Amino acid sequence: MTFSKISYEVNDSVAVIALNSPKNLNAFDELMIDDVLTALEKAEADASIRVVVIKGNGPAFSAGGDIGMMYKGIKSGDLDLESGVQKIALISVAIKKFPKPVIASVHNAVAGAAFNIALACDFCIASEDTKFIQAFVNIGLIPDAGGLYLLGRAVGVNRAIQLGMTGKPVLAKEAQMLGFVSEVCSKEELEEATAKMAQKIASGPAQSYKYMKELIYQSQFADFESYIKAEVMAQSACSQSSDFKEGVSAFVEKRKPLFG
């Protein structure tokens, strides 16, 4: 199977999905979203795979949404953000419902939807240079990919809304203290630390993991997909606003946005 925006490989019983569009910091477009969803389906169907790792090739894990693409869509008048917002949420849902443990292995920028996909994973290993950023507010949007839902459960409602409204970066050590990062290491040690954790989990009881994830989903995430529908509607409304157009334009033009 050929992928255009990711690489997929299996080492022993561990499937590694690597975001592989480093020129734009692994920003998510619909091709990458489709690739990730297909790779997750492939890993789920392969009985030999016991753990999945999601990582980013190049200088960062992911910058989140493709703002350059948004800017072009705004200028041409044919931007349809709703389809992409619906699709990227499917990644978070797929990870939460995935019957095998999923590890996020992240470094440098983990921004926007990438932050929320990392939150959806069962474990997150971060290098010391990692910055988690709910960057949506900077372009007049709301957190998508299940952002507020996942963040609220990870850090509490008040901290979630503060991070959502300010877009304040969270460094790796603070993220570990907040509880959504399980391990912090140097950038040089990230690959080794990830492989070590993946192999440790892969040697554990697969059926126990499967049922743990099912029970957690039933008890804590049963209304997740209903939330996603409301999130898509809200994001679609935000994408029609003048704040969004100004925020994207200001980002691309490297100036401070003039929200009104």
Image: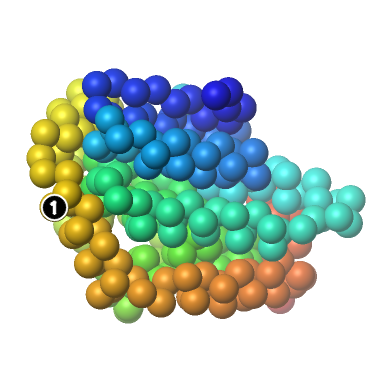
Instruction: Check the picture and name the quadrant holding the N terminus.
Output: top right
Colour theme: rainbow
Residue 37 on image: x %, y %: 51, 44
Residue at x 24% of width, y 58% of height: 213
Q: Amino acid at mark 1?
A: Ser
Instruction: Check the picture and name the quadrant holding the C terminus.
Output: bottom right
Residue 149 seen anywhere in this rendered image of the structure: yes
Residue 132 on image: x %, y %: 38, 50
Residue at x 52% of width, y 59% of height: 89
Residue at x 48% of width, y 75% of height: 227
In the image, residue 235 sits, relative to residue 110, either above or below, namely below
Q: Name the residue that disc number 1 marks.
A: 208
Residue 254 on image: x %, y %: 67, 46
Label 1 neighbour load within 10 Å: few <14, some 14-19, many 20+: few
Q: Determine which quarter of the picture holds residue 147.
A: bottom left
Q: Secondary structure at mark 1?
A: helix
Q: How many marks?
A: 1
In the image, residue 84 sits, relative to residue 146, either above or below, namely above
Residue at x 51% of width, y 65% of height: 143
Does residue 13 appear to the left or right of 59 in the view shown?
left
In the image, residue 230 sits, relative to residue 33, either above or below, namely below
Outermost residue, right direction?
A: 76
Residue 104 on image: x %, y %: 32, 42
Residue 133 seen anywhere in this rendered image of the structure: no
**139 or 225, which lies in front?**
225
Does residue 243 appear to the left or right of 64 in the view shown?
right
